[in-house]
Image: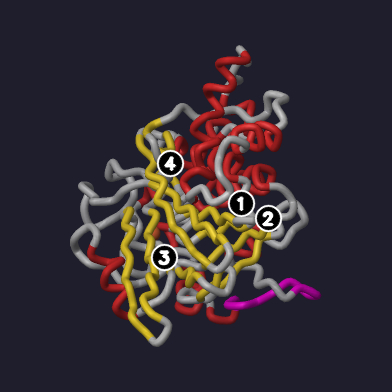
Amino acid sequence: MAKHALVIPDMHVGFRRATNGNLTPLHDESALKAALKMARQIRPSEVVMLGDNLDLAAWSSKFVPTPDLRETTQASLECLRDFLVALRKAVGPKCRLTYLEGNHEARIGKLLLVVAGEAYGLSPAGSDVPALSVPGLLRLADKDLRINYLGPYGATYWLWGKVECTHGDLIRKRGGHTVGARLVEHPNHQTFGHIHRCELAGRTLHGASGPHTVWAMSPGTLARLDGVVPAGTAHVDWQQGLGLITLDGEDIAMFLIPITNGKAMLPGGLKPMMDLDDGIDDEKVVTKLAEPEPKDADRFRELQWVETLPQVWEQRHVPVQQDDAILGINLTDVLS
Ligand SMILES: [Fe+2]
Ligand SMILES: [Fe+2]
């Protein structure tokens, strides 16, 4: 039976604070919600978060943060933790969740070493999780999350022992070029973040056992694209998206899921997102839709049930509920 992994790239959860105290998010709330909905639909056995999930602009030792980026860390932590709790609920207790450290998470340790080196790595008595660290501040090991944090920045997670997952540090100027460059340096299946672009490329190697194709995927970002996120330019060449990696026997397939205007795009076109809390037994629906398919149907067929479900609902006249109620998370409330 095929296994699926959902790949969530750079969320950059963070805020700018106006002089009246109002918070403007750096992350795209609708993209985060789309990620939660996709997690519910795919029901992955693994979720890999590629890092830079927190922006932590005020912790940068690279540039001087402007006043509007100060006093936003607590709100960022609360917001990301709420998202992670909703993600755990969406994928269920058996799903393995992995959080890779990105260069933005690494900002905390780097700044501590400069201004308060004695605090670096300091853990509460009886604990081995540093207090001023991302896993410590988000309580990632707690029962309601059980998320594996892999650091330091540069750490690699080998998904199913076959796919190299890392935050990454290589950036090529033009779209599509970084995956190609990565495949030269790392001729293996891989997914990485950091570049905030949706890119997918393959490379076919010819060895003793014949041709073998490996894939590289960058799923993009869940950050806003309108210049709010601190970057070198307001006109960022970024794209929003998610990644889906499927293991079928020994074979790996990778799919990019672009997010456009807060909606995740699946093969076949833009579809409205759905509520799976409507009393329909999802497993039965999947089975019913899969019945006419031959056993050797291609992998895109496995995704077809996501496409077809809205039609099933229309036929049954099942009303679609409000999105926020479905997910048990209201990011607007989190911000207020
Ligand atoms: Fe990064
Ligand atoms: Fe990033």
Q: Residues within 10 Å of mark 3 (few under 14, many from 20)?
A: many
Structural distance between the alpha carbons of marks 4 and 2: 28 Å
Q: Which residue is mark 4?
A: 25
- Furthest toward the top, the residue is 317
Front-lying residue, 148 or 305: 305
Mark 4 / mark 3, whichever is N-terminal: 4
* Vertical order, 129 against 1 (above or below): below
Front-lying residue, 92 or 113: 92
Q: Are marks 4 and 3 in contact (CB under 8 Å)?
A: no
Mark 4 / mark 2, whichever is N-terminal: 4
Quarter-of-image position of residue 40: top right
Residue 49: x, y in percent? 52, 59
Mark 2 / mark 3, whichever is N-terminal: 2
* Vertical order, 107 against 262 (above or below): below
Q: Which residue is mark 2?
A: 95
Beta carbon of the mark 4 residue lies under 8 A of ligand 2? no
Q: Are marks 3 and 1 in contact (CB under 8 Å)?
A: no
Residue 250 appears left or right of 148: left
- Picture quarter with the N terminus: bottom right
Q: Residue at x 46, y 72 (%)?
A: 111
Identified by mark 2, the residue type is: Cys
Image mark for residue 23: none
Element under disc 4: strand
Q: Residue at x 52, y 76 (%)?
A: 152
Identified by mark 1, the residue type is: Pro
Q: Residue at x 54, y 45 (%)?
A: 302
Dot in front, 3 or 1? 1
Q: Which residue is mark 3?
A: 192
Residue 234 is at least partly visible in this image? yes
Q: Residues within 10 Å of mark 2 (few under 14, many from 20)?
A: some
